Amino acid sequence: MAPPIPREGPMLGRRTLLLGAAAGLAALGLASCASPGAANGAIPLKFWHLLSGGDGRTMAELVARANAANPTFDVTQTVLTWGPPYYTKLAMASAGGRAPDLAVMHAARLPGYAPGGLLDPWDLDLLAEFGVRREDFGDRVWESGLYDGDVYSIALDSHPFILFYNTDHAAAAGLMEGERMRQPRDADDFLDMVTAMKEASGGSGLSYGYVNDGAQMWRLWYTLYLQQGGVMELPIGGKARIDDGPAVEAFRFMQQLVDESRGVPNADIQTALAEFISGDSGMLLSGVWELPSLQAAGIPIDAMPIPNLYGTPAAYADSHAFVLPHQNDVDEDARREVYRFVAAILKDSFDWAGAGHVPAYLPVTEDPAYAELSPQANYAEVADIINYDPPAWFTGSGSDFQSLFAENLQPVLLAGADPQAGIDRFRAAVDELLSKPNPV
Amino acid sequence: MAIATAPRASVREDSIRRPGKPGEKRFGLGRIVAFAILILLAVTWLLPIAWAVATSLQTEADAGSAPVSWVGETGVTFAAYAKLLAEGNVPLWAVNSVLSSVAITLITVGTSAMAAYAFSRLDFRGRKWLYAISIASIMVPPQVLIIPLYYQMLAFNMVDTYWGLILPQVIAPAMVFILKKFFDQLPVELEEAARVDGATRLRVFWSIVLPLSRPILAAVSIFVFIGAWNNFLWPFLVINDTTLMTLPVGLQTVKSAFGVQYAENMAMSILAALPLIVLFLFFQRQIIKGIATTGFGGT
Amino acid sequence: MTTTPTQRPPITGAAVRPPSPKRPKRRDGLAGWGFFAPFGVLFAVFMLWPIGHGIYLSFTDQSLTGSGGGFIGFANYLEAFGEAEMWQSIGNTLWFTLLSTVPLVVIALIMALLVEQGLPGKWLWRLAFFMPYLLASTVVSLIWIWLFTPQLGAINTVLTGIGLPAQPWLQDPSLSMVSIVIATVWWTVGFNFLLYIAAIQGIPEQHYEAASLDGAGKWRQLFSITLPQLAPTTVVVVILQVLASLKVFDQIYQMMNQVVTPSTQSAIVYIFDAGFTGYRFGYASAVSYIFFAVVLLVSLVQFRITARKGA
């Protein structure tokens, strides 16, 4: 006869399993009822961005204000790690068709998203309903959002690479012209100005952090390259066009800039910042987003676009822009609220200037109050001369392109390696990328 | 008649041997040294979690300022935990983890047990081949399938859905293997007797075989549950919607708008670790037995 | 009338049935398929089909965005074989496997041997050594990133406190793999520890009694009885450990701050980067199968070695 069935203990008996399943289903029911925002009728919107630190704080405030002022929507922001983690997840979400309602992207990354159908185009008429029109944006910023005739990104700002300077040191070095520092006549004149700054500050003439930071290297180099009229083209399936003359000259100039006779020769971004903040340096080359830290430090500063050293006015910049990730089933009401939200943020973007950025929405920068903002008002005109990364699926902020630049060209600055050889290596690496099929 | 439960050795709770090996002095030098090394190892192993807890109980300002210490300057505070439980998505992620882990465990164990029973007891065309294929698939690491699986999710429009999260995780051929081995050694007389009395196969399975298999089912369930709860790669790939994320994925993907928050990160880690640790504290014996049993069957 | 189903005799215990002559008719067809079907359907859809479709994808230029998908022959494989970064990722994976398997086996064994001395406090050892295994990879990575943080991290704080230089644990490419291995060992040693505990407890007491009667001391017993008895377990532990290490993704991706570093990325990280960050499903699929071949090769080598030893 059958022996008594041994009991292992009540823990995982069938009864418990069934109870567990029932509890699970009950929780499922509860969870689906607990969707946020359903209570008061506001449409919940999901907003992804990659801004953190000072930028993150400012954006959080802008979002909170927009939510408070607009009861028809309730925006929840989600922040992902800057760079590849953000962009990869955004692409995967868009490919899956259940992406967030709104996202921020760097405008220069558009070629990696729009052609593949990962983004939905903006409806300009609907935008106009909420008071946002083409005329409200500068030409270059607007063009950065176009693909194949449609508008895929609406810029919130442009954030160029500029020159900050310590006004006290500039005055001591005799470089002031009225309220602002004078413009250099050419590249050599600028180097003399840096030397003068070094004597005045007692530390460095100019701080520039670039070690292990491809973005920083690229930003300055590309500015100088463009100022000489250099052109960079990246045709898929072809060869990269990089003009050797301007390319090498830009490096030669940078080598002199970071020469130890003028400053710290091997600074990374934090070291350069710290040096300038402590007052030991006359100038700082960095992005506008550093402004809050500089102002918080209390040093007397002003800023200007990178001086035109070679003839062609040009500056590197990228933009934070709003995009509509692709959704398989678009909820028209929700989309409408997204437009309302974007318009609200753009109109409120005066505070975004406080983070150092140049707001893209012209009514904000043309407002008299903006002229009072110092030093932002002193470099706002850079928006007319900005240049984005050469369009390709692998360029843009946070992309491999800029790390590739660092890999091949850091020795030129760090160890005095030959610029031409470095350019050739870089060109070869880019050509290899171009030879691969465009995966977008 | 004894019914062999777990294959191989079982982990006994208390040492039924006398302390020490035979022929050994109880407080000999060797044992003291061994004890000392053991204490050292245990402390080393406990330190990281202890440090994480200590950091989580500081204010953000204290945690982020040098020099770091066990207790922050402003003392012990639960502020980080309060913030996580009040704002943000941690509770939601916990619910997602519970639901998906329970579902995965139920479906995996259920389907694996049925298949194992079929292989063990039932005679049907193609049985040998199907078993061979199932066992052979143990050699395929799931990680090499992430590309075609994600493509499949795109094609079925299952990205960012619960089923897209759950279904690819319920295939566990190793568990089929383990369960079949167990069923093979259950005596068939009980089932035969029931069949003679007119019971269907399903009834025999449910009323006789499963109850007899409680220990192995428990072991398999525990192993599958822990694996499902802690699984990162597949949930990370298939879920982008922050309201559908499980705890491990949410922790990794969603960052603070204010930059790196050390105390908050550690509090989040402890919260994410708590459920399984609490389970462990209550069900130590079963969990250890479960791991030791199924561990030999494959990871 | 009882009929005997055609089945293999049970392994232990129960009575062995006389083998029945093979019948051409499958009696349990409906029930058999019925019981198998739930698993079978899921298995076919989510295991078999991806395996086959993955092979197909590897011959196309399919993109994450849905574009591409045309047949391109062996182009992906040729590209992969010529791609230094691909080989480097496999090399990194093998290096990680070697670096982590040795301590994960040796330390687990030492722990188990120490614990099974019959010392008091069994619950403490079990908790301390095994608890980390119950943590999710994300938790482990967050904790160790915090420990490894350059200035504020506990490890560097201790190092500088005793006069040693602070190390760039995760920032220096030549050091980062070691750091990740340290975290991995802490995390997963508990699993092997348990397997060894179970095995040690399975060694019959008589061996030790006989040995001590013969005058063998503790160390002698260890080397003549315990370790040889544990050899089969060690084989299993090593095999499992190697196979698990080859598949590493989580902690490498998480602790490298999610930025792709060719010097540290494992094969699966490279596949993820190529397929999801780079959109190239076809190419990533090809690399997946190349890597699968490597895993099979390693398994084969292991099987050969252990079969020879065991025989």
Image (cartoon, coloured by chain):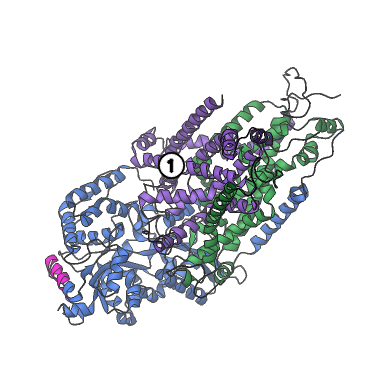
Chain colours: A blue, B green, C purple
Q: Is residue A222 left or right of residue B190?
A: left
Q: Mark 1 falls within which chain?
A: C
Q: Residue at x 43, y 70 (%)?
A: B65
The question of residue A186 being in magenta is answered with yes
The question of residue A74 being in magenta is answered with no
> In the depicted view, which residue is nearer to us: A153 or C134?
C134
Q: Is residue B250 left or right of residue A373?
A: right
Q: Which residues are magenta?
A: A182-196
Note whether residue B263 is visible.
yes
Looking at the image, residue C47 lies above or below residue A370: above
Q: Is residue B195 left or right of residue C187?
A: right
- Amino acid bearing label 1: Thr
Note whether residue B104 is visible.
no
Q: Residue at x 64, y 60 (%)?
A: A32
Q: Is residue A437 left or right of residue B38?
A: left
Residue topped by disc 1: C93
User: How many numbered discs?
Assistant: 1
Dot 1 surroundings within 10 Å: few (below 14), some, or many (20 or more)? many
Main secondary structure of the magenta stretch: helix
Quadrant into which the N terminus of chain C falls: top right
Residue A138, given in percent of the width and then of the height, sits at 30, 68
> In the depicted view, which residue is nearer to us: B210 or A225?
B210
Looking at the image, residue C38 lies above or below residue B272: above
Residue C167, given in percent of the width and then of the height, sits at 38, 57
Q: Quadrant of residue A222?
A: bottom left
Residue B61, given in percent of the width and then of the height, sits at 47, 72
Q: Quadrant of residue A103?
A: bottom left
Looking at the rendered structure, the secondary structure element under dot 1 is helix
Looking at the image, residue C131 lies above or below residue B143: below
Quadrant into which the C terminus of chain C falls: top right
Residue C207, given in percent of the width and then of the height, sits at 66, 33
